[in-house]
Structure formats: C-alpha cells, structure tokens
Amino acid sequence: MGTRLRPLTSTRPKPILPVVDKPCLEYLIDSFVRGGIEEIYLACGYKSQQLMDTIGDGSDKGITIRYSFEDEPRGTGGAIKLLEDRLDDIFVAANGDVFADIDLKKEIDVHIDNDADITLALTPVDNPWEFGTAIQDDTGRIIRFLEKPKKEDVISNLINAGIYIVKKEMISYVPKDQEYDFSKDLVPMKTDEGARIWGHRLDGIWMDVGRRSDLIRANQTVASRKEPGNMSFVTESKLCGTSYLGNNASLTFSQVTDSSIMKRSAIVNSTIIRSVIMPGCIVDGSMIIDSVIGENAVIRRGSVIRNCIIGDGEIVPMNSDLLERGGA
C-alpha cells in the first residue's frame, strides 16, 4: 500500500508511480518481455482497477497480461498459490513494487544450467538489514538466507531483489488459503532443508522505491538515459545535471537540476533541485528541493518546498514554506 509515499499512494497503487513518464511496474514488465516471457499474471490487491487501467492487457507489447485478485492479503507465496494450476513447470515471479530494468534472460539461464529449485536475483545494498540477505558458495548456491536481520546479525550485503525463477513443484510447499511469503517463509525453509537454491547477481538496474528519496533517485537514474520529450519547450532556462523534460512540458526563466519534469508540466520563474514533478503540474515563482510533487498540483508564487511529498491536485498557497511533509 506504499504508506511511506502517501499521499501519492492514497490515489494510486505504488507500482504505477511514474518514473520519467512511465509506470514503475512497466520497466519490470519490459524486462520480462526481453527475457522471452509471453504471459504475465498480476496479483492485485490495493486499488486494482487503477492498475488494470494503467497496465492494460499487454497487447501493445505482444504479450498477454492477465489479472488475479485476492480477497485478503496472502503474501507473495499465497498470491502465487492461487495461480498454481496455471503455472508452467518453471516460471518467473517478481515483486511488482520495485523499480527493475534488468536482463532477466541471464537469471533464467543460471536457473536452468544449475537445475535449481529456486533462483533469486541478488544485488548489493548499503542497508541489507531491510531485506532478505544471502550467502553463496563458490558455485553460486545459496547456503544461508536470513530475512530482515537485525543490524548486528547481517550476514551479507547481498539482498534478495524479489525476482525469482521457480520450479512449480516448490509451490506444493505453500499452504492454501493463508498468508505466506517467499522471502520470509519458503526460501529460508528450503535453504535450510538443502534444496537447490541459487543466487544470480543482477545485471541491470534495481531499486527499492519505498521512500521519497528512492523515487527521486529512480527518476534521476532513468533520466540519465533518456532524451527530452517531444514538443517540450525551454525558454531562457537551464536543464542541468541528470534531468528529464517530458512531452509538452515547458521551462520558462527557470533552472532545473537533477530532476524529472514530466509531461504537460509548466515551470515558470522557478528553481527545481533533486525533485520529481509529476504530469500536469504548474510551478510558478517557487523553489522545490528534494521533493515529489503529485499529478496536476499547483505551486503558487513565492513558495519554498523542501523534503516534501505534495499530493495529486493539491494547491499550495502563495508564499508557503513547507518542510518535511508527506510520507512516513
């Protein structure tokens, strides 16, 4: 439910938050397409209709996207258990609320080459205690796995990125009709039992986007690889550092640094630093630093916004001075 990104996630599910004018989840779906996946099921819970409306049926990508619905949260394992009779003998499962633009084919090859039961995508992070951590032997097999350890109990900086290649028979160990998690329950159990659990170091970009700073960083990362949008307008302005300007967005007498200005937004006489301005916003004569501004928001003249999340459609009055607002 993305509580740390409220109020943005009060009006949309976290997986469709935009990263340079594209839903976050769509980068992962595109990675699946490049990896040869032809059919995807999205297990939906919170605000599922919006997810369906945004992602669609996959026909634009030449694949099939179907939807599965939970009456109540069942965890990653429980959600997949609902689909057990529709899964191939080997299938891919992934958390949909992360930013991932990866080479999935390499992880699939590692799984098949090692006849693994489960293969986990692994990536190094600075805060491993917030994730599942793994230790591998020289062959890449995972010999120890610990979910969200205390700081003093961290066994590795390699964490579970939540992208799995799985033998279908593993789902027989997931109990029916209850909440059950891949990372917290299934992977530690099967590792301890000596199952063939493998790890693959991710090739590509992976980020958790649970916080305001994470969403800003994901936009900066993708902006470094994107061209400005079509029909964007820059008048007496500077677009500095790693920045993005979307379709029909405009900068007038403004400076934007390390920020993402999405489609149809208009920035006038303003300074934007390390921030995300979502589609359709108007920013007039203001300074925005380390903040995320929700879709169709209006920031009126003379305002200073720092370390904030501003909700969709919100109007910030003239001469406002906002600090540390929004999020958890």
Image (cartoon, rainbow, N blue to C red):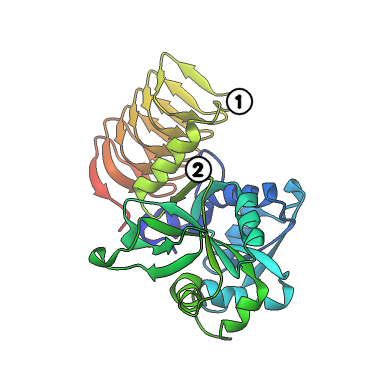
Q: Residues within 10 Å of mark 1 (few under 14, many from 20)?
A: few
Q: Nearer the viewer, residue 5 or 43?
A: 43
Considering only vertical position in the picture, is 204 above or below 113? above
State the residue position of label 1: 230
User: Which residue appears at 54% of the width and 45% of the height?
Assistant: 203
All told, the count of numbered labels is 2
Q: Residues within 10 Å of mark 2 (few under 14, many from 20)?
A: many
Q: Nearer the viewer, residue 219 or 249?
A: 219
Which structural element holds mark 1?
loop
Q: Nearer the viewer, residue 223 or 141?
A: 141
Q: Position of residue 78 (x, y in %)?
A: 56, 78
Residue 84 figure quarter: bottom right
**Contact (Cβ within 8 Å) of mark 2 with mark 1:** no
Which structural element holds mark 2?
loop
Amino acid at dot 2: Val
Which label was assigned to residue 19? 2
Q: Position of residue 235 (x, y in %)?
A: 45, 15
Q: Closer to the N terminus: mark 2 or mark 1?
A: 2
Judged left or right of residue 207, residue 226 is right
Q: Position of residue 296 (x, y in %)?
A: 47, 42
Amino acid at dot 1: Asn
